[in-house]
């Protein structure tokens, strides 16, 4: 069984080896990685990983009509690895598949859902946990505080990425879900959530977030680390949004994602296999040197960015702002009521 991970990256070399080692341990067999406009050696690291047979690297220099990630996925649509894959999933580098059944691998998850043609892996947001300085440490070990399992707001906290069978039902890659369905094949599609529940027909086309107020993680989840250390967040703002170049990564983004309510160490179940894969990657002297250079670049780039008042102001606000807290259900209902009213008015 060939399972393909499609990844888009820019200036994220310091995190690349951990992400790759983890998903090798999870059971992805092929990796198609598209990079653009790298300043930290990400593209050079990807070239070396391609030389050593760990992945396939494509440059995505632009133009980026519709956003960098959309342009990358459009380019990936026609790649032979996509045609050869049995299962496909599109990623960002701050997303880690976390499977809770069997040996914590993709075969174990798919064995638990034998009728599935698509599985929604709902984000579990892991917050900043008060970490200020960037350190060259595994993300999955450093950030272990997350959003509550049962959460009713914001809706973005319930977004998912889709692991889907490449059987022709969907003909194009998408950021959160596959696109361009074949109408003749669509009625046979079977979507399941991360707790093994069958999902309704509304999930076959456009839905990108799971139902609120229920456990979507019993079988699997997608650990999402969108913030990292405060220093790293300043670099993330500098990098820009992959799909919304005209939208600032500021306090709104931070506030909705900075959840540190509950400890979740479940991803550590795969740590021995991940660490073995990571050690094998770092045994390559060129990869180890590129990784170390990327870590230094992050420190240097942060110092450069802090010469600008906008970045100093944002850094100060990050230091002052506490983690997110759950909104009472009655207040969530008020928000939803106004949203529904606005939707009816626009129809």
Image (cartoon, rainbow, N blue to C red):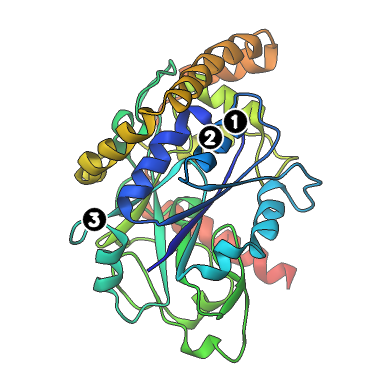
Query: Residue sitting at 44 percent across and 18 percent down?
Result: 134
The numbered mark, 3 or 1, whose residue comes first in the sequence reads 1
Dot 3 and dot 1 residues touching (CB under 8 Å): no
Nearest to the eye among marks 3 and 1: give it.
1
Rendered image: mark on residue 300: none
Dot 2 and dot 3 residues touching (CB under 8 Å): no
Q: To which residue does mark 3 refer?
A: 104
| Structural crowding at the residue carrying mark 1, measured as other residues with C-alpha within 10 Å and reported as few (<14), some (14–19) or many (≥20) | some
Query: Residue sitting at 32 percent across and 28 percent down?
Result: 142
Residue 285 seen by the camera = yes
Q: How far is the residue under mark 2 from the one under mark 3?
A: 28 Å
Residue 4 at x, y percent in the picture: 47, 60
The numbered mark, 2 or 3, whose residue comes first in the sequence reads 2
Locate residue 332: give its quadrant. bottom left
Q: Mark 2 falls on what kind of element?
A: helix
Locate residue 175: give its quadrant. bottom right
Q: How far is the residue under mark 3 from the one under mark 1?
A: 31 Å
Query: Residue sitting at 34 percent across and 60 percent down?
Result: 213
Quadrant showing the C terminus = bottom right
Identify which residue, 298 or 274, lies in the foreground.
274
Q: Is residue 101 above or below residue 128?
A: below
Q: To which residue does mark 2 refer?
A: 48
Q: To which residue does mark 1 refer?
A: 44
Residue 224 at x, y percent in the picture: 42, 44
Q: Is residue 41 above or below residue 180?
A: above
- How many callouts does the rendering have? 3
Query: Residue sitting at 70 percent across and 46 percent down?
Result: 68
Dot 1 and dot 2 residues touching (CB under 8 Å): yes
């Amino acid at each position: 069984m060939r399972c393909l991970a499609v990844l888009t990256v820019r200036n994220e070399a310091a995190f690349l080896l951990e992400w790759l080692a983890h998903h090798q341990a999870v059971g992805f067999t092929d990796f198609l990685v598209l990079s653009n406009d790298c300043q930290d050696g990400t593209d050079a690291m990807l070239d070396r990983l391609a030389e050593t047979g760990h992945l396939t690297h494509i440059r995505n220099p632009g133009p980026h009509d519709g956003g960098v990630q959309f342009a990358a996925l459009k380019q990936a649509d026609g790649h032979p690895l996509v045609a050869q894959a049995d299962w496909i999933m599109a990623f960002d580098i701050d997303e880690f598949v976390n499977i809770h059944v069997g040996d914590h691998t993709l075969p174990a998850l798919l064995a638990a859902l034998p009728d599935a043609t698509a599985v929604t892996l709902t984000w579990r947001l892991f917050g900043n946990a008060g970490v200020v300085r960037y350190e060259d440490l595994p993300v999955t070990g450093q950030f272990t505080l997350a959003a509550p399992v049962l959460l009713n707001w914001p809706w973005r906290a319930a977004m998912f990425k889709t692991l889907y069978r490449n059987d022709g039902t969907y003909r194009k890659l998408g950021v959160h879900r596959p696109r361009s369905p074949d109408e003749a094949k669509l009625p046979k599609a079977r979507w399941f959530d991360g707790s093994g529940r069958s999902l309704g027909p509304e999930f076959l086309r456009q839905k990108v977030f799971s139902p609120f107020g229920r456990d979507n993680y019993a079988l699997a989840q997608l650990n999402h680390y969108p913030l990292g250390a405060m220093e790293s967040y300043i670099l993330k703002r500098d990098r820009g949004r992959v799909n919304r170049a005209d939208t600032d990564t500021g306090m709104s983004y931070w506030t909705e994602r900075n959840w540190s309510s509950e400890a979740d160490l479940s991803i550590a179940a795969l740590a021995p296999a991940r660490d073995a894969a990571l050690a094998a990657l770092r045994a390559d002297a060129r990869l180890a040197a590129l990784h170390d250079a990327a870590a230094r670049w992050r420190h240097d780039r942060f110092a450069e960015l802090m010469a600008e008042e906008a970045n100093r102001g944002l850094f100060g606000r990050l230091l002052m702002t506490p983690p997110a807290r759950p909104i009472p259900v009655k207040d969530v209902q008020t928000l939803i009521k106004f949203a529904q009213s606005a939707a009816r008015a626009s129809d």
